[in-house]
Amino acid sequence: MKISVIGGGYVGLISALGLAELGHDVTIIEIDKSKVDLINSAKSPIYEQGLQELLEKHIGKNLSASLSYESVGGSDVSLICVGTPPLPDGSADISYILSAAEKIGEACKDNSDFHVVAVKSTVPPGTTKDSVKPVVLKHSGKEPEEIGFAMNPEFLREGRAFEDFLNPDRIVIGSEEPKSAEMIEMMYAGLSAPVLKTSLTAAEMIKYASNALLATKISFANEVGNLCKRFSVDVYDVMKGVGMDHRLSPHFLNAGCGFGGSCFPKDVSALASLAMKMGENPYLLNAVLQVNEHQPEKMIELLEARTGPLSQKKIAVLGLAFKDFTDDIRESRAIPIIKALLAKGALVSAYDPLANEHMKALIPKITYCTDAKSALLNADGCLVVTEWPEFSDLNEEFHVMKDQIIIDGRRILRTEQAEGICW
């Protein structure tokens, strides 16, 4: 199949490479010229395991990037993979979606073949049917039977995205008519996964509900963990027992300093905002966000209880990305932690295997180190914020600290000196 992927960001680039790996002819359409140039020169604009190797394998063969929508006219499918950032009220901004829909429509004016426009971005329920479809039809001049529409949400974990693309738990396809759903299903031929076909709006809600439930499990584990700390109980033992129940699962029950990234905070906020607009009070969703917002404060409170006032004390922060195997700092729990330390007058030294430069652009007035030992040198305390595997091997490195007060926010350390945030 010939596929146009609108948006060369994280979801668009991973999806394009995954589809190229399945044998399709893929064109990435991106408005950022520098990103187009990087992709076409087989250089990755983002970090993701395996991404660079796949770029080198497919670019110039069955994968290319362009500033133009010209490829849409000759494509079987256009996948919309642009961002839906949060607005001030927490709702999703779909302006990039509508802009892409308008340009897809214009590019389809002279296309005589049936074309499917599929939304892969996370959008509020009703967006594809009530916004994308009428915009595409208006600007293409086509009749509804000439262009199909689908919602095909992504379920990719940053750091493990290609593993998830090639080995999905499920493929969700929302559509109004069978032909569109069949074409999207054909697009994934070669993958072994159950296919759920549903309505456009139900598919959009599945994405929001999935992320909201995963975030809820994390906040639940954190709230239970905070209580376990009061009883000197290891919350990981507790959640291991909880996760063994066949009605539940052990995944996403790890307590710590909270969730971050480009999906969970944004999507839970958007779903809560949507509920309010529809006249429903999202009590649980609001609580999930509140627990996550306050969880980093627990690390600061525990640190102060062990060190005393933080003014002029050197505190090492290990881990800046929102999770391991990525350089993404969006909504990273390291951000509120570092800001709280600076507000209390602490001197912060930080290290992350990949995210130093991204955090430096956001918070320049701290010391960034090239390894963990340098960050720990003469430190009065240490906070571990990201679950990088290399941190689990740290032991003697902590001996260079002035005081070995170590707060682990991810249950990654093996050293006996470490104390858990809620265990």
Image: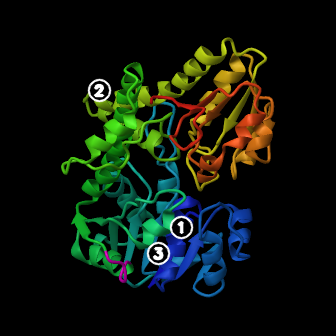
Residue 337: image quadrant is: top right
Element marked by disc 2: helix
Residue located beneath label 3 in the image:
108
Cα separation, mark 2 vs mark 1, equals 35 Å
- Residue 47 numbered mark, or none: none
Q: Nearer the viewer, residue 250 or 60?
A: 250
Amino acid type, callout 1: Ile
Q: Nearer the viewer, residue 416 or 316?
A: 416
Cα separation, mark 3 vs mark 2, equals 44 Å
Residue located beneath label 2 in the image:
283
Q: Earlier in the sequence, mark 1 or mark 3?
A: 1
The answer to whether the residue labelled 2 contacts the one labelled 1, judged by CB atoms less than 8 Å apart, is no
Magenta extent = 188-192
Question: Is 294 drawn above or below residue 104 in the view shown?
Answer: above
Label 2: few (<14), some (14–19) or many (≥20) C-alpha neighbours in 10 Å: few
| Coordinates of residue 48 in the picture (x, y in percent) | 60, 62
Is residue 369 within the magenta segment?
A: no
Q: Earlier in the sequence, mark 2 or mark 1?
A: 1
Q: Residue furthest top?
A: 309
